[in-house]
Image (spheres, grey):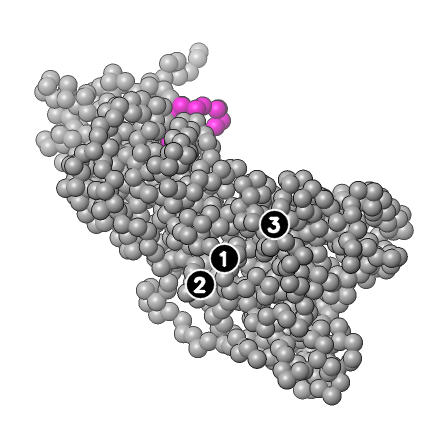
Amino acid sequence: MSVSEIKRVNVKNMPDEEYFYGHKACPGCGASLAVRLALKVIGEKSYSVLPAGCMAAVGFIYPQMAFRTNAMISTFPGTASLLSGIAVGAKALGIEDFYAVGFAGDGGTADIGIQALSGSIDRNDRIIYICYDNEAYMNTGIQKSGLTPFGTRTTTTPAGRNLPGAITHKKNLFEIIAAHGIEYAAVASIGYPVDFMNKVNRAKHCRGTSFIHVYASCPTGWGIPENTSIAIAKEAVDCGLWILAEYEKGEFTITRKPKTFSPVADYLNKQGRFRHLEDEQVEEITKHRDETWDRVLKTWKLKST
Amino acid sequence: MVAEKLFISGNDAVAMGARLARPQVISAYPITPQTIVVERLSEMVEDGSLKAEFMHVESEHSAISAAMGASAIGARAFTATSSQGLLYMAEGLYYAAGGRFPIVMMNANRSLALPWSIYGDQSDSLSQLNSGWIQVYVEDAQEVLDMVIQAYRIAENPAVLTPFMVNLDGFILTHTYEPVSIPDQAKVDEFLPPFSTPNKMSFEKPMSMGMVTTPMDNLEYKFQQNKAILDSVPVIEEVDAEYAKMFGRKYGGLVEQYRCDEAEVLLVTLGSVTGTARVVVDQMRNEGKPVGLLKVRYMRPFPTELVATVCSKARRVGIVDKDISFGYEGTLFTNVNSALTTLENPPRTFNFICGMGGRDVSKENIREMFSRILEDSSSKLPDRVQFVGMKVSTDERK
Amino acid sequence: MTKRPGISDWNRPKHIDDYFVGPRFSAGHLAAGNAGWRTFRPLVDLEKCRGCYRCYLVCPDGVISKKDGKIEIDLDFCKGCGLCAYECSFEAIEMIKEAEA
C-alpha cells in the first residue's frame, strides 16, 4: 500500500479499545500516553516489547498487568533483539498477520540499546521501534542519558556554581537511525498526538524496520505541573527545539514548520530542570536551535499539506 | 538405525545435530572456536537442508535475546557461543532460565581473558553454573551430536522447561575429526516431537511475559525454577535410555562410571580429558593399580547422590579441573566436595588444576595425578589444591 | 461503547503450582484501581461538553471514554492528573478536591 493510500487516523475513527490500562505511571505521564495511543493504532494482533524502564516497571508488576495485548519485558540492552527474535520466530511459525512493537526510553534506545537497534535495522526485521524520549533515565531517578539536552539538571548532572547541568547536547538519534537507510523513521511529540498516531500508522505498513522518536513529557523528572504534559510537548515543537520530521527513501521531510518560533526562554522557564539556566546558556540553546534549523532547511523537504 | 557415518569435526557434529533437531530460529554470533558451527548452519540454510530462519545478530547478547524472543512465541531456538561471548550474554543466561525458555545452546569451552587465549579450558561455562541452565559436558564428537538432540527433548519437557547448554572442549573436540554416526532424520523426528509450550504469547491467550515480582512472590519463582532442574533428573535418565534404544548409544545419564569397582583411588573428570584418563586407567589396572574413573556428564543438575555413592567406596579422589576460582579451588572440586559431605566417612579429595588456556593434559599428567594420590605416606601426598603441568618452577627464589 | 477494563477477583497463590510456569500472567489482569492516588477528581459539565474528544485523546490512563456523543470518566482508575481539564477548550471539566467530592 502506498503512503497516500493509508487511511488517516483521527479522534473520530481511532479504536475505542484501551490496550494499556490500569498502569502505575505517574499522573500526567507523557510516555504512558505515547504507549496508549500507539497500541490503539497497532491493535490486538501485536507483541509488544519493553525493556527495563518506566513503561515496563508500571505495566507488569505481578499481579497488575496493564498491557491487555501480548507484551514482554526484555533485558535493558535487548529491546530490539528480543523484538527481532519475536518477528523472525513468528515468520518461522508462519504467522503473517502480526505487529511486533517495542517501546523503549531514551536511555534504553540511544545509549544501552543502540547496538541491538542498529542490528535489527541492518537485518531489516519487520519491527516497529518507538523511543519515548523523556530526556533522562527516569525510572532510576532522573539521571543523564545520551538524549539529555544541554543545560538540564539531572541527579548526575547537578547544576551548581561550576556546571550548568548537562554540558553536552543531545545525540542526534533520528539522523543516526536514518543513516542506516531504514525504511521509515519519524520524529513525533505527544503535543501533537494525532500526528504521532498517523506516524505509527505509517510505520505499521512497513515491510521492514521502522522507528519513531516521540517526545514524552515527564512531570516528575522535569519539574512541571502534571496537567501541562501535553502543553509543554506542543511548546517544544512550537519553539523549534523539537523538529517533527520523517525519513523515507533517502529523504528527510519536516512535517511541521512553525511560522515563527515561540521564545525558547519561555519553554525553559516552565520547567524545574532548566530554571537555573543563565541568559548565556539560554542563548547557547537558542543558537543551537537556529544552527540546526539552518542546516535542515537547506537539505530537508517541507511537507506539503 | 544408522543413516550414515561421516568423518567430521566436533563443530560439524554440532551443526548436524542441530539440523536434525529442526530448530526454527538460529541466532548466533561467530567466536573462535565455535565459528564452524555457525558457518555450517548458514550453509545448511542456504542449500535448503535446514529450514530455519538464520539471524545475523550483531552480538552474543542479541543472540540470546533473539533466541528468547523466538522461544517466547513458541518457536524452537538454537544458538552457540564460547568464552567471551558466553559472558557477554551472561545476563541473558539468567533471563532465559528464569523465563523458562528451553533454548539449546552449544558452548565451545574456551579460556576467559585476560590473558587472551583462544584455546580450550572450562572456565567459561563453569563460571555460569548459577545461571539456571542445565549443563552437560561431552567427551567426543559423537556425544555432542547426540546430546544436541537429547537436549531439546529434555529441555522442552513440560516438567522441565529450562534452557540447556551443551559444552564441547574448544579445539580439542571442536576442531578434531572422528567418525560420527549421523542418525536418520525420520527417526529423530519420532524421538523429538515439535516444540509446544504453555509459556508463550499468543493471540488466543494474550500474556504479559517476563513480569516483575515484588518480594512477595520472587522466592516462590526461584523455588519453581530450582525444582524444575531437580525434576529434570528422571527425564534425563529416561531420555538417555530411550535414545539408546532408538539409536544404539547409551551415555549413562548424569555420570558414567569407568572401572570404579574395587577402585581405591578415583579420578573425577569433565569433558574430553575423560578420554585420556580412560586410557591411563586401563594401563594402570593392567599394572595392578586399583584405580578408576568417574565421568561427570551433567554439572547441573549436579549428580550429588551418584557422586557420593561412587566415591564412598574409594579412599582418595582426585578431581581434575580445567578452571579455577581464584584464591580458592576448582569448581568441579567444590561441587564434588559438597556432595561428599552427605557421607559419614568421605574419602580425602585432591584438586588438580590443569589444562587451562589450552595446556595439554597428557597421559603422563594423568598418571602423575593418580600416582600422587596412590601414595601411602601422607608426607608425599599432594597439596589439597595443586596446579599440574606447569612448565616453570614455582619455588620461592632465594 | 466498549466495556471498560475492570478489577479482577484475584486471590494470592497458596501452593507453588498456583503460579504459572515462568514469570508471566494473563494480559490485562488488574488487581487494583488507581483511585487512591487522587487529590483532585474531574467533574464533567455535560452541558458544556461538545464531544470534541480532546480529553479522551490526551488522557494518559485512558479512563475517559466516548458516551452518547459526550464523555464519561472511569473513576476507579483516574489518577486526577488534570490533563483533561487543562486541555478542554470549553471549560467542561473542573478539578475538584477529592476530599470535598
Q: Which residues are magenta?
A: B107-121
Decide whether residue B108 is among the magenta residues.
yes
For badge 2, the amino acid type reads Phe
Total residue callouts: 3
In the picture, which quadrant includes the N terminus of chain A? bottom right
Density class for disc 2 (Cα within 10 Å; few <14, some 14-19, many ≥20) is few
Task: Out of B326 and B23, give the one closest to the viewer.
Answer: B23
Which mark is drawn over residue A83?
none
For badge 3, the amino acid type reads Ser
Residue B166 percent location from the top left of the image: 33, 37
Horizontal side, residue B184 vs residue B210: left or right: left
Secondary structure at numbered mark 2 = loop
- Chain at numbered mark 1: A
> Label 2 belongs to which residue?
B203
- Chain at numbered mark 2: B
Which mark is drawn over residue A98?
1
Cα–Cα span, label 3 and label 2: 23 Å
Q: Quadrant of residue B120?
A: top left
Task: Out of B391 and A282, give the one closest to the viewer.
Answer: A282
Q: Name above or below for residue B354 compared with residue B313.
A: above
Residue B392 percent location from the top left of the image: 39, 13
